[in-house]
Image (tube, rainbow, N blue to C red):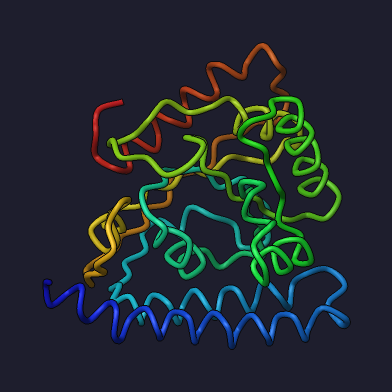
Amino acid sequence: MSFALIRTLLITDPLIVLATVVMGIISFCLIPIDKDGSKQIWCAKFWGRMLTRILGMRMEVEGLENLDPHAHYIFAGNHRSYSDTPALLYALPYNFRFMARSGLFDIPIMGTHLRTAGHVSVSLENPREAVRSLVEAGNKIRNEKLSILIFPEGGRTEGPLEPFKEGVAILGIKSGAPIVPFGLIGTREILPMHGVAIRGGVVKVRIGKPIPTEGLGNRDKGALTEQVRNEVAALLGIAP
């Protein structure tokens, strides 16, 4: 048994559980006074910062100067590890919501937070339900002026970068919000996809320039999907 695994089991995992339970209780207590979910998002961001420390993630964020702090966006990028979530909560200073797979909404405590904070459930098995989720997310962006974060690969991947699903383009076209590509580097080294031992290290979040979507139609979704993927690949430093 490696030192990293022993440290994970005896120190890191208990601290993750403790931080999650404490912030989950605080988030749950805020529900009656949190009309728009913003207070629960604050809790999630604080939890994310706690986890970056617990996981030993030395965060480097590049490209925030590309963004208007008063605008709302669709953030889209690669997904390599469970540690991506705290990294993004740390890196993005926005009142954003995740598009998360529907199964996560069934998990006790986590599911309650996801629903009451206004995150969007998306089915990976039912295309009709997935389209309905995209319409819901588009309405949130337009009507509530919120940002949405989506992983266009459809989940965690083992390769460098999988093909993107067209949902990110549909969301951009429906809402008219710019799509901001991001690249996550180093999270797989913190916690591999099928690994258990957690190792600290540098995590880079590279944020690209917003891609306009206003005025685009359904005929543009293929080209827009490819453009977003190419931008993410460039941020990761890999071939499209």
Instruction: Return the residue found at the far front.
Output: 1
Q: Is residue 184 left or right of residue 224?
A: left
Q: Position of residue 23 (x, y in %)?
A: 60, 84
The image quarter containing residue 95 is: bottom right
Tally of numbered tags? 0
Residue depicted at x 36% and y 48% = 80
Q: Quadrant of the C terminus?
A: top left
Q: Quadrant of the N terminus?
A: bottom left
State whether residue 222 is above or below residue 99. above
Residue depicted at x 68% and y 61% = 70
Residue depicted at x 52% and y 25% = 225
Q: Is residue 10 left or right of residue 37?
A: left
Q: Position of residue 118 (x, y in %)?
A: 76, 60
State whether residue 97 is above or below residue 116. above
The image quarter containing residue 168 is: top right
Instruction: Return the residue found at the far left.
Output: 2
Q: Position of residue 211 (x, y in %)?
A: 55, 36
Q: Tell which of 221 and 192 is nearer to you.
A: 192
Q: Is residue 159 left or right of residue 180?
A: left
Q: Is residue 146 left or right of residue 84?
A: right
Instruction: Return the residue found at the far top.
Output: 219
Q: Position of residue 44 (x, y in %)?
A: 60, 73
